[in-house]
Structure formats: C-alpha cells, structure tokens
Image (cartoon, grey):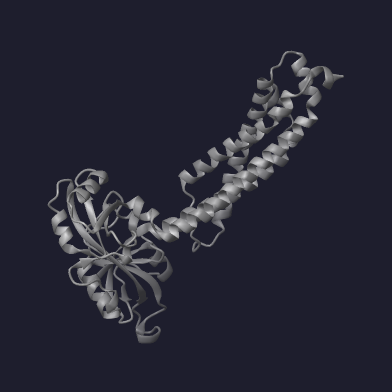
Amino acid sequence: MSIALKELFRQPRRFSAVTGAMTLLIVLLVVLGGFLDGLELSQTGAYRAHDGNVLVFDDTSERQLQRSRVPTTVADELSVQPGIAAVGSLDATFTVAGIADEAAGVDGRDELEDVALFGYDLATDVLPEPPTAGEAIVDEQLRRVADVEVGDIIEIGPSAEPVTIAAIVDDLTNGAPTVWVGVEEWRRLVALGNPSAVPPEGTAQILVVRPAATPAEAVTAVDGAGLGGVEAITVDEAIEALDVVQQQSSTFQGIISVTFIVVLLVVALFFALITLERVGLYAVFKALGARTGELLLGLSAQAVVISLVAIAVGFALSALFVSFLPPELPLRVEPARLGQIALGTIVTALLGSLFTARRILRIDPAEAIG
C-alpha cells in the first residue's frame, strides 16, 4: 500500500483525469441533492413546523390535508386521553395576498402573490401563539418575494381583507408562501373569499395532537380511544404521503443513483487501464512474494485518496457555483446530504477499484515476466 501511495503523490498527473471527472460528478451530485432537498423542504414547511406532534386525518382522506374532514368533537374526546397534552385544529387553503398600497394596482393593491392560508390553534417550537383577529404570521419566503415587514398590512383573498403582519417566521413554505392566522379568523377570511372551501361547522380539516411524552404514545392513545373514522400519524408519515414529495423524490433519487453508477464506471475503467499498464510490475511484485490482497489494498488506497481530493474540490466548487444561482431557485445544500454524497463517493470508488481483482488474480509472474 505504501508503494501505491508514493506513486499517487509522486505522479499526481497520472491520476488527474479521473480526479477531475469525479470532481465534476460530485458537483453534479451536490446540485441534484440540493434541488431535491430544496424542493422537498419548500413543500413541507407547514408540516415540519409541527414536528414532534401527531396529525389526525379523516381515514378516507389518504392523508391529504385538504381532503380531510374531522369532527371537532373528536378533539374534545382526545384531549382527556392519557398521553395527550393538547389538541387543536389545522386548516388550509390556497388564495392570494397583496400589499396594501393606495397608489398601486387595482383596488389599491400591489402585485398579487399566491399564498397558502393556514388556520391553527396550537403553538409549536416554530409557530408562536395564534395571532389575534386582524393579525397574521407570515413566512420568510413572503417577506422576500413581496418585501413585507412586521407591521405591514396585507390583503387576503379576492375580497382583499386587510390583516396586519404580527411576526415573520422562517421555513414555513408549503409549495407557496404561507400566511398563518387563528382558526376562527381563517374561517372568516375563507368564507368571504371562497365559502365553498370552508369545512362544515363543527369540523376541521385535521387535528394536531401535542403528546404528553412521545409521538408514538400519542398515536397509541388516539388509536386506543376507539373513535373510528380517523387516523393518527406522525409528521414524517404525513410528509411521505404527499404526492408531490413522492414524485420529486423518486425522480431525483433516480438521477442521483445513475450519477453514482457513472462514478463507479469512471473509476472502474480508470483502474482497469492502470492495471493493464502495470501487469509486468505486478508480476514482479508477485514473484517477490506480494499477495493479491496487498495489491488490491494499494489500489483501494489510491481510490480513497482520489475520492477525498475530488470530494474536497467538488464541495468547494459546488459552494462557488451555488452562490451564483438566483436565490429564487429552491436549492438547499443540507449537511446530511453532503455526508451521504461523500460516503457514497468513497464506497463507489472502492467498488470501482475492486473491478480489477479478477485480472490481478490471473497474473502469472512467470508468464508476465517472460
């Protein structure tokens, strides 16, 4: 192995082509992973804001929020169950929001933005207590696209109902910028703009259950209440049920998997060519007593070092490339994704280097040396 590493450091140009190819592939993997994470996170902020809680859906809704209708009497029954600390409603609909400006646009409104309007009861680690009537909490995405600040007035829905921004919270996007109000205020705003979207009196789209201890215990408590017609799931399970998340994930995961296969083929081809060039050298090593495992270990060490160099340079180039992309693009480079790419690259490179094992095993020192 020491000889293989000495060759690597004394003749780096020999390995520059494969290192360069792997570096570019790593940049591609980082960008693809960033888009996958960015798209998923931008579609699921409203769910992740309730992380640690349990969501209760109508069991015929296929875990889709806007298809679900749960009687609020279920909330009353669940609130007294052991293992449950509190229960609240969560409702959502899509509408438009504009910035109040007497000098701008039709009806005194600036350019309209599509938003998801949420009504909620329970505060979380992300969401503060529901605002009072006439106030709303908005996410950071709306601040960026509409240039709003705390204290500004936005006008909700076709009827342009004014509400004052009470707070701005990051990472609440749910396919569109989100606006959060209390449940009663939500019903009032939706009834003014789109009455058909308001759930019947005495129902909510879903319930949010705050566990007394763990989400698993809360799920068990809901199931054990014997209410029927409802299904309790964790936030992660609700996210996995979203059609858009499933489609995006399967598409990008397929592309990422193909890219890793390309990395494997690049490394395998490079070391296959290197092995052909070294047949005589390996024959001498074998004649001197070197074992096949030691030769393969040397190739594996070279593959790991090449991978580490490509990872370091690839991550640096990725950061530079991402900095030039428009901020509107849904790209988020998460540390966990970088760790997966680094580990996947090293494992793939190791596998590629071992493709030469059969050829090295077949080398006969007497025949190769002549």
Q: Is residue 57 above or below residue 22?
A: below
Picture quadrant where residue 19 is located: top right
Q: Residue at x 45, y 56 (%)?
A: 246
Near-viewer residue (148 or 16):
16
Q: Position of residue 79 (x, y in %)?
A: 15, 54
Q: Position of residue 70 (x, y in %)?
A: 23, 63
Q: Residue at x 61, y 48 (%)?
A: 259
Q: Is residue 355 left or right of residue 31?
A: right
Picture quadrant where residue 163 is located: bottom left
Q: Position of residue 60 (x, y in %)?
A: 30, 61
Is there any visible trace of residue 319 in the rendered image?
no
Report the residue that reaches farthest toward the bottom.
Answer: 106
Q: Residue at x 53, y 56 (%)?
A: 251
Is there any visible trace of residue 33 in the rendered image?
yes
Q: Quadrant of the C terminus?
A: top right
Q: Is residue 285 left or right of residue 77?
A: right
Near-viewer residue (174 or 111):
174
Q: Residue at x 28, y 77 (%)?
A: 196
Q: Is residue 208 above or below residue 264?
A: below
Q: Position of residue 13 (x, y in %)?
A: 74, 36
